[in-house]
Amino acid sequence: MSETPTATSELTSQYSAQVAEDLERNLKEQERLSAEIDGLQAQLAALRHDNTVLVSIQQALGVSPAPAAEPVTPVPAPRTKQQPTARAADKRKQSEKTAVPARKRAGKKAPAKTPATSSTTPTLVELVRGHLADQKEPRSAAEITTALAQQHPERTIKTTVVRTTLEGLVAKTHAQRTKQGASVYYTAPETAAPATQDASAAEPSA
């Protein structure tokens, strides 16, 4: 009779250990997915920022007002037979007067938008790339997060988002990753260029 309690206790301990492992895996998977979501949100914000910049540049170049000049209604042509030509001339003068201030307004609005884009805050990708370019030694994601948080206290910078941003830069060959034991360090491509050239001459040809 004494064997059954010990057997049940062993089973419960095994089940509890397995449940603890499953919970740990679940938490790690949640952290990984949240990091990916934060990285995607950062990339989406950067794309939206680029979209606004491109739209402002397009307006500054005067590309958008061009289609507005097309809808000139040629319908009043048959009315010229019934109406005197003086009214047609007055309409042309009025259309020219309205078109000139519209162009002037467009020219005044364009320079007002361009400085606004230059004063916008840089994206996290730009901050990370600039920090790596200024560093001479490899830096971890936590070190980069601490440095950026000190430089930009008005922004909330998370280590998971910085790590995802660094991995995106590595995928685009805008940064390089080195592993020392269990730690991962990142460097700018310029600093690691001579080491890679000495290691193998086949990579630059690719």
Image (cartoon, rainbow, N blue to C red):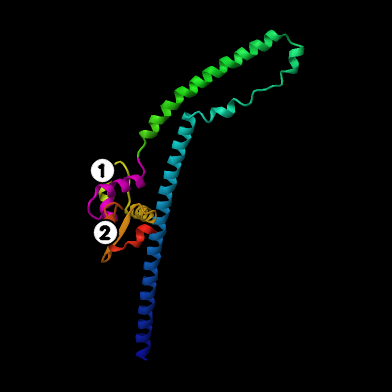
Q: Residue 67 vs residue 104: left or right?
A: right
| Image quarter hosting the C terminus | bottom left
Vertical position of residue 123 compared to residue 79: above or below: below
Q: Nearer the viewer, residue 2 or 170?
A: 170
Question: x%, y% of residue 78?
Answer: 75, 17
Provide the secondary structure element on which disc 2 rests.
helix
Spatial separation of the CA atoms under disc 2 and disc 1: 30 Å
With 65 as the anchor, is 11 left or right in this view? left
For residue 96, above or below residue 157 = above
Q: Is residue 139 magenta?
A: yes
Residue 151: numbered disc: 1
Under circle 1, the secondary element is: helix
Circle nearer the N terminus (2, 1): 1
Q: Amino acid at mark 2?
A: Ala
Question: In this rendering, would 12 be left or right of 151?
Answer: right
Q: Which residue is mark 2?
A: 195
Residue at 40% across, 63% down: 29
Residue 66 appears in the figure: yes
Relative to 29, is 86 above or below?
Answer: above
Residue 97 in picture, x, y percent from top left = 56, 14
For the question of whether residue 192 can be seen, the reply is: no
Q: For this view, does 84 lie left or right of residue 173?
A: right
Q: Is residue 50 magenta?
A: no
Where residue 154 appears, as percent x and y from the top left, is 30, 41
Residue 146 is situated, as x and y percent measured from the top left of the image, at 26, 50
Q: Is 72 drawn above or below residue 119 in the view shown? A: above
Disc 2 vs disc 1: which is toward the camera?
A: 2
**Magenta extent:** 122-144
Q: Given the image, on which type of amino acid does mark 1 rest? A: Gln
